[in-house]
Amino acid sequence: MRRAAYQDLITTTKALARELWRASDHLLDPESTPADWQSQYREVHEAWTHFSAATAAVTIAGPGHAADAAEDLRTAMREWEMIVTEWTKAAVGSGTGENAPLQERFTVAAKAKRGPDKAFQHAARYALATE
């Protein structure tokens, strides 16, 4: 059960990250439209839903240190996802995806998730005694 929960969290983390990067690409594409931005945002939200469920499964599967690491990862991914939410709303409102402050926050959040991502993988290896 733990191995499957851990693997699902890793997979859904990567899928959510992919959709967040796609959203950024759409927002920065001068040929994209508000409809494109909103469509991609729906993809981000769908990926978030799967990721969030996978995080909950890890907190149930445990042990505590893996659950804590999963929660730290969820917090980092939530910050990144909320920036895309804000950026998409701003773009739709202004008609342009160019937004230097949000682009910078996006990049910072993308880098910030690396530590919790690696920490969760380490916690999973430890819990599965594969370390």
Image (cartoon, grey):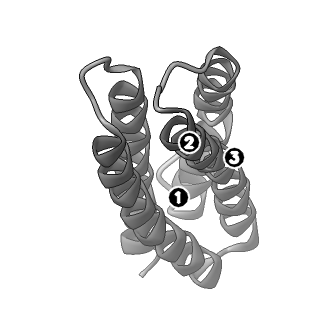
In the picture, the quarter occupied by the N terminus is bottom left
Please state which amino acid type lies under the numbered disc 2.
Gly
Q: CA distance from mark 1 to mark 2?
A: 50 Å
Label 2 packing within 10 angstroms: few (<14), some (14-19), many (20+): few
Viewer-closest of 127 and 84: 84
Q: Nearer the viewer, mark 1 or mark 3?
A: 3
- Mark 1, mark 2: which one is toward the viewer? 2
Q: Residue at x 46, y 32 (%)?
A: 95
| Amino acid type of the residue tagged 1 in the rendering | Ala
Callout 1: SS = loop
Q: Are the two marked residues, 1 and 2, in contact with CB atoms closer than 8 angstroms?
A: no
Separation of residues labelled 1 and 3 (CA atoms): 31 Å
Vertical position of residue 41 compared to residue 17: above or below: below
The reply, left or right, for residue 70 in relation to residue 42 is right
Q: Please, what is the three-letter code of the amino acid marked with disc 3?
A: Glu
Q: CA distance from mark 3 to mark 2?
A: 21 Å
Residue found at x 64% / y 49%:
82
Q: Is residue 77 left or right of residue 48?
A: right
Where's residue 18, x and y in %?
A: 35, 40
* Residue at left offset 52%, top offset 58%: 129
Secondary structure beneath dot 3 equals helix
Q: Which mark is residue 129?
A: 1
Query: Going by the picture, which residue comes out furthest to the front?
Result: 94
Question: Where does label 3 land, which residue?
Answer: 79
